[in-house]
Image (cartoon, helix red, strand yellow):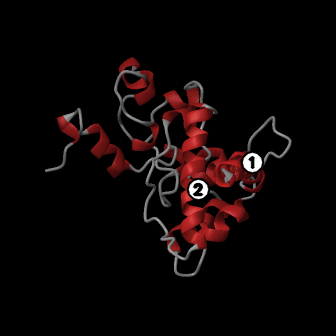
Amino acid sequence: MLVAAAGLVGAPAGWLATDRLERNNDFCNACHLAPSRPLHSEIRESFDGRPAASLAAAHAAAGVRGREDPRFRCIDCHGGSGPLGRARVKALAAKDALFYAVGRFDEPRAMRFPLWDSDCVKCHARFDESLRRAPSDAGAPPFHALPVHNSSLGLACVECHTAHEVGTAKDAYFLDADHLRSQCARCHSEFAGP
């Protein structure tokens, strides 16, 4: 009974406390930036770097309009959207925190749970004209201008838009051409390699 009561009080308090803490990128990185954990060190370095060298860094440089604190934060993408998305993130964070506290936390090499489209469309609700144009060097029709690509294709945003990859071209919306061709090849055989 005591454990149940502690859970009823502790869970909401923990939820609210972590909501406040996760607004600070340094809080997120406190667990992810140990010297033996290079993944997030490189991501944070790129995120804070100027000029922007990745899609995530471009978001950080642009900030978020209409908010008291216009800085773009890790949690703005990785926080989940809607009650189910937030609960998923909180459950994963609680598990990671427990493993960290008992000394069994292993830095992930990649995202275990990729972002959902709802995490992207909460800010990118529509494809405006700047997103409808094909990058100048692509030589292909504008992807989002073709109706079948916008909703019925079944591709998640993150299958093409990799946020933390460094070295992709800013004028091509930080899309990696080789990665993009491999995604296109799933339906279009002419994009498949030899």
Depth-wise, is mark 2 or mark 1 nearer the camera?
1
Q: Amino acid at mark 1?
A: Val
Distance of label 2 from label 1 (alpha carbons): 18 Å
Residue 93 place in picture, x, y as percent = 58, 56
**For the residue labelled by badge 1, is the local secondary structure a helix, a strand or a loop?**
helix
> In the image, is residue 178 above or below residue 66?
below
Q: Between disc 2 and disc 1, whose residue precedes?
A: 1
> In the image, 185: left or right of 67?
left
Residue 65: x %, y % from top left: 78, 37
- Res. 93 mark: 2
- Residue beneath the point at 31% across and 41% down: 183
Q: Nearer the viewer, residue 190 or 8?
A: 8
Residue 53 at least partly seen: no
Residue topped by disc 1: 9
Name the outermost residue toward the bottom: 35
Q: Residue at x 35, y 33 (%)?
A: 140
Residue 30, quarter of the rendered image: bottom right
Residue 70 horizontal/vertical position (percent): 80, 45
The type of residue carrying mark 2 is: Ala
In the rendered structure, the answer to whether residue 132 lies left or right of residue 148 reads right
Q: Residue at x 62, y 65 (%)?
A: 44
In this rendering, position of residue 6 left or right of residue 163: right
